[in-house]
Amino acid sequence: MDLGIKGRRAIVCAASKGLGKACAMALAREGVDVTINSRTRDVLEATAKEIRDATGVKVTTVPIDITTPEGRRAVLEACPEPDILINNAGGPPPGDFREWDRDVWLRAIDANMLTPIELIKATVDGMIARKFGRVVNITSSAVKAPIDVLGLSNGARSGLTGFIAGVARTTIKHNVTINNLLPGYFGTDRAMSTIKAQAEKSGITPEEAQAARIKTIPAGRFGQPPEFGALCAYICSAHMSFVTGQNFLIDGGAYPGTF
Ligand code: NAP
């Protein structure tokens, strides 16, 4: 299927590894020029080369922290008129809420709630004027089924989800949609560090924790980042102009609810 986005421009945040990288690669395979960002320059440049070699699209790199005002400014300077915005950042650290003070909470809210909101604020009116826009926020299955050690993520991302639910209904008449993608367990660096934290909390080995986690996933395995990237690219496609404010779970069937 032709997704109808060849020649479009995308910003993909936090995209040198894992899910962000998979989204950038999937969009690039559809002919989208991508501006990718992450903090570690050499890893980001290696990813950019991999995407260019695989797809031939224009890949621009911005090695900077996206959760800072300077970071967002630099990314927007590199791609001032994106048609597609993929919001992503590292997740907050796991832990016990008794140890989190106001500053820890503000860092999580800055990274996982206010950064996507700021980037939407900076880009959505241009998308509206050009009559095409796709925003995808990478959140977490923890928005629907909270994970105890990830209280900072549960809280900050639910705040973002509530905000998006309102604003997404105001832009769709201009062919600008805003949706959330909720990963369950994917075999990325981030997932492995969460499993390690859960293992430490439960007094078992990371291998035991990993096996126990896989047992909770009806698919019987962790997700693979390209599966995530493919759904992201489809949500960004020309065909998805009638869908906004939705939360797409991609978790191998792990969420047990009917709705
Ligand atoms: P990952 O494999 O660890 O990759 C994270 C990427 O984000 C890296 O490229 C990293 O590069 C970049 N990054 C982190 N903090 C950044 C910042 N402040 N500014 C710019 N770039 C930044 O993680 P992932 O598994 O893809 O996770 C992506 C998001 O999905 C996270 O928010 C995570 O919590 C969430 N999530 C993941 C899963 C899962 O199973 N993987 C499940 C639920 C939710 P640098 O470190 O060099 O900046």
Image: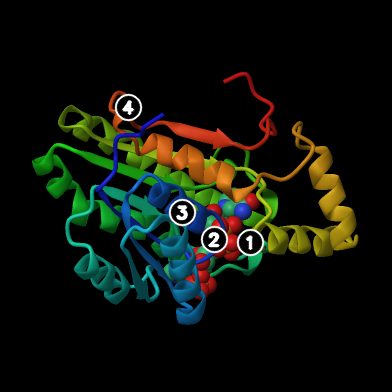
- Where's residue 195, x and y in %? 75, 58
State yes or no: discs 3 and 2 in contact (Cβ < 8 Å): no
- Where's residue 40, x and y in %? 48, 78
Residue at image position (66%, 44%) is 223
So how many labels did they put on this image? Answer: 4
Q: Earlier in the sequence, mark 1 or mark 3?
A: 3
Residue at image mark 1: 190
State yes or no: discs 1 and 4 in contact (Cβ < 8 Å): no
Residue at image position (13%, 49%) is 126
Q: Amino acid at mark 4?
A: His
**Helix, strand, or loop for circle 3?**
helix
Task: Tell me: is circle 1 under 8 Å from ligand 1.
Answer: yes
- Residue 196 in view here: yes
Give the colour scheme of this rendering. rainbow
Q: Earlier in the sequence, mark 4 or mark 2?
A: 2
Residue at image position (34%, 40%) is 164
Image height of 123 relative to 240, above or below: below
Alpha carbon separation for disc pair 4 and 2: 30 Å
Task: Tell me: is circle 3 under 8 Å from ligand 1.
Answer: no
Residue at image mark 4: 239
Image height of 53 relative to 70, above or below: above
State yes or no: discs 4 and 2 in contact (Cβ < 8 Å): no
Q: Which of the labelled discs sits on residue 25, or is there none?
A: 3
Left or right: where does residue 173 sit relative to residue 189?
Answer: left
Task: Tell me: is circle 2 under 8 Å from ligand 1.
Answer: yes
Q: Residues within 10 Å of mark 1 (few under 14, many from 20)?
A: some
State yes or no: discs 2 and 1 in contact (Cβ < 8 Å): yes
Q: Which of the labelled discs sits on residue 91, or is there none?
A: 2
Tell which tag, 2 or 1, sits nearer the viewer: 1
